[in-house]
Amino acid sequence: MNDSRKVCFNTAKRIVVKIGSGVLSEEDGLNLKAIRSISGQVCDLVDKKLEVIVISSGAMASGIKKVGLSRRPDEIPKRQAVAAVGQAGLIMEYEKAFARYNKTVAQILLTGDDLSNRKRYLNARNTIYTLLSWQVIPIINENDTVVVEEIKFGDNDNLAAMIALLMNADILINLTDIDGLYNKDPRKNLDAELISLVSVIKKSIEKFASDIPGALGTGGMLSKIKAAKKATAAGIPMVIANGKREDILTKLFSGKEHGTFFVPKKEKLASRKRWIAFSSKPEGSIVINDGTAAAILKRGKSLLPGGIISVEGNFSVGAPVKFKKHDDKILGTGLVNYSSADICKIMGLKSNQIKNCLGQKPYDEVIHRDNLVVI
């Protein structure tokens, strides 16, 4: 067994388990057998004093059957209505499944706005912490009933990664309907080979993933790779495994090498920096020169006004803003000490010239290193 994988599973205390539509759906609605099996395995982990957070798809599959439709509707209001009906049925099945093991569940529905807003982000985190301390299993889904494009997570793969970051999880397990990441679509190519370990997510890895679409749900393999990029960049390992395999969670934690393991960066990002990098919504961009880019990337420096070439967008003090090179390559995100209007006035200047320009100098840095994350 790979040493990184072994260490991660042996030391994990807080786990996020994402269960995809391909695992939870059948032709006539929810796959109740899968719900009961995975719920039992989660309870085994909880009984071993591990904390488990479940990200669950399946509301649409449940709702379609209850409403009596033959397929997923195209119109957004109808989809949201179906999801509303289905979410009630989905959580009811989880309640029944977990009750067999004397465990309590809690339903949490989130939108992207809930995590991009710092106050709501912290409130969500505190709520989930409280549930875990009570040994209640949080079951989280996107709030499809009210969500619009601007505040969507995009898919539950991304939501799972965001929750793993929110809760500083030790591992993210993404359960889908195939065994992991292959070098080509295994449903079409008999010679497709499973990639058991990914140390660095290169463009070639994304190319493999883009060729393997999802049969159900909103995400395919590519969305899982994007989720893995976020998680591993923050120091959290991720596994893609087949949720239809019998006792898959039990096997993973007993040392069986199933699925594809994504190796995390050695150091975890601090909570505040995880929010800046992955949950906040940038309101603009700052373009910097090559020398400043090197100082930030290689020497861990703050962003000073002298290295700024231009400013894009309108934003106020404290806003999350991307910083990038002149070739549009995004380097990271940070919280600015000056508004876009003031940055336009001081860009290119030395820090000791700021006061003469603006009449005051609250900060030397446009973005302090403590509020800056290189992505």
Image (cartoon, helix red, strand yellow):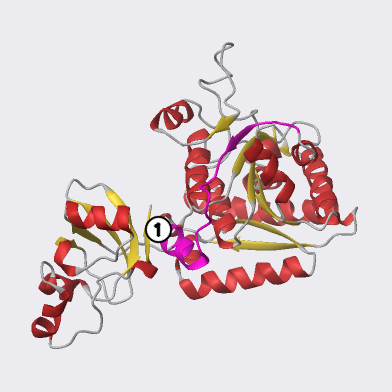
**Residue 196 in view:** yes
Q: State the image coordinates of residue 16 (x, y, percent, origin top left).
A: 66, 52
Asked if 10 appears above or below 344 in the picture, the reply is above
Q: Is residue 127 magenta-colored? A: no
Horizontal relation, residue 354 to residue 374: left or right: left
Q: State the image coordinates of residue 109 (x, y, percent, origin top left).
A: 61, 61
Count how many numbered circles sit on residues in the image. Answer: 1
**Residue 175 in view:** no
Q: Nearer the viewer, residue 43 or 200?
A: 200
Instruction: Write the residue at 59% across / 23% down.
Output: 194
In the picture, residue 334 is in which quadrant?
Answer: bottom left
The magenta segment is 256-279
Q: Secondary structure at mark 1?
A: helix
Asked if 325 appears above or below 353 in the picture, the reply is above
Instruction: Write the residue at 50% across / 29% down.
Output: 213
Q: Nearer the viewer, residue 93 or 51?
A: 51
Instruction: Write the residue at 13% across / 68% down.
Output: 347
Horizontal relation, residue 306 to residue 233: left or right: left
In the picture, residue 25 is in which quadrant?
Answer: top right
Q: Is residue 259 magenta-colored? A: yes
Kind of residue sitting beneath label 1:
Glu
Q: State the image coordinates of residue 208 (x, y, percent, origin top left).
A: 46, 26
Q: State the residue lying farthest toward the top.
A: 191
Q: State the image coordinates of residue 154 (x, y, percent, origin top left).
A: 47, 49
Tell me the residue that label 1 is attached to: 150
> Which corner quadrant holds the N terminus?
top right
Q: State the residue lying farthest toward the front.
A: 299
